[in-house]
Amino acid sequence: MNNVTLKGSKDGYVMIISDQGDFSNSLKELKKLIANQNVGSSEEEVIQVTIKTGNRLLTDEQVKELKTSFAEYPEIEIKSIDSEVEAKSSIEKLIKDSQMNIEAGIVRSGQKLEYDGDLLFLGTLHEGAHISATGSVFIIGDVHGVVQAGFPDNTGVAICGNLTGAAQLRIADVIEIATEDNADKFKNNSFAYLDDLHTINVEDIQNYREIIKDSRKRTV
């Protein structure tokens, strides 16, 4: 059974390294396979190779060994190294970023509460207090302080619900301060988001799904 298989595609080549075989043996087989491709002319067009490792997640050292094997052949370039599994740290981050937090307490002046993921705020935010989330913030309670979504640089989020009385809205690195001139747009049943000019805009909550969908497309 071969540990390494080479297949052609319209975008280049796909090299499949078996997740069942010993990696060291697979690496030796891979080197022989490369050597048999008759590369070596500097005039040849660079060949793009996608490497697939199945259910094997390569370590940093194994990735380094793999790249070293290809370094002898400048006519072959690794396009990507793809695995069907994710690193534990990536999964943990995904879970953390997608979780919904619920806060129903009183946040007093001088306090700052921070959350990973989205936040449903049911409590009372006093003037001079600050709540912050890496995701979106949904407000059913009363806010009179600073509400921040998308900390520190997530622009595809929103602050939704009861914005009445908020002193400041922050999304990623953009700040909107409530003043006499704009206080009327800080109201209930609305949401704040970053528009295509990277400024905070406030719309009726009925338009949330359509606008946020477009906003997230711009951040991809």
Image: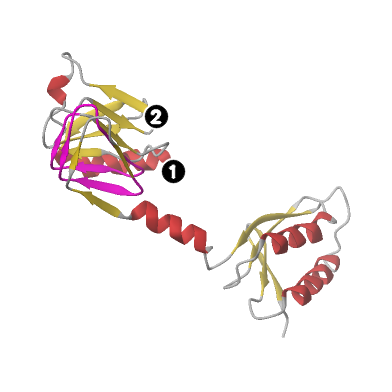
Q: Earlier in the sequence, mark 1 or mark 2?
A: 2
- Whether residues under marks 1 and 2 lie with C-beta atoms below 8 angstroms apart, the answer is no
Front disc: 1 or 2: 2
Residue positioned 77% across, 70% down in the render:
27
Left or right, residue 87 beside residue 220: right
The percent position of residue 59, horizontal first and vertical second, equals 66, 64
Nearest the viewer among 142 and 23 is 142
Residue positioned 44% across, 55% down in the render:
93
In the image, what residue type sits under mark 2?
Asp
| Residue 150 picture quarter | top left
The percent position of residue 172, horizontal first and vertical second, equals 38, 33
Nearest the viewer among 52 and 55 is 55
Quarter of the image that includes the C terminus:
top left
**Mark 1 crowd level (few <14, some 14–19, many ≥20, 10 Å Cα):** few
The residue that label 1 is drawn on is: 220
Chain part drawn in magenta: 115-144
| Residue 130 picture quarter | top left
In reply to whether residue 180 is colored magenta, the answer given is no
Left or right, residue 79 beside residue 26: left
Above or below, 207 against 176 in this view is: below
The residue that label 2 is drawn on is: 173
Left or right, residue 91 beside residue 54: left
SS at mark 1 in the image:
loop
In the image, what residue type sits under mark 1?
Val
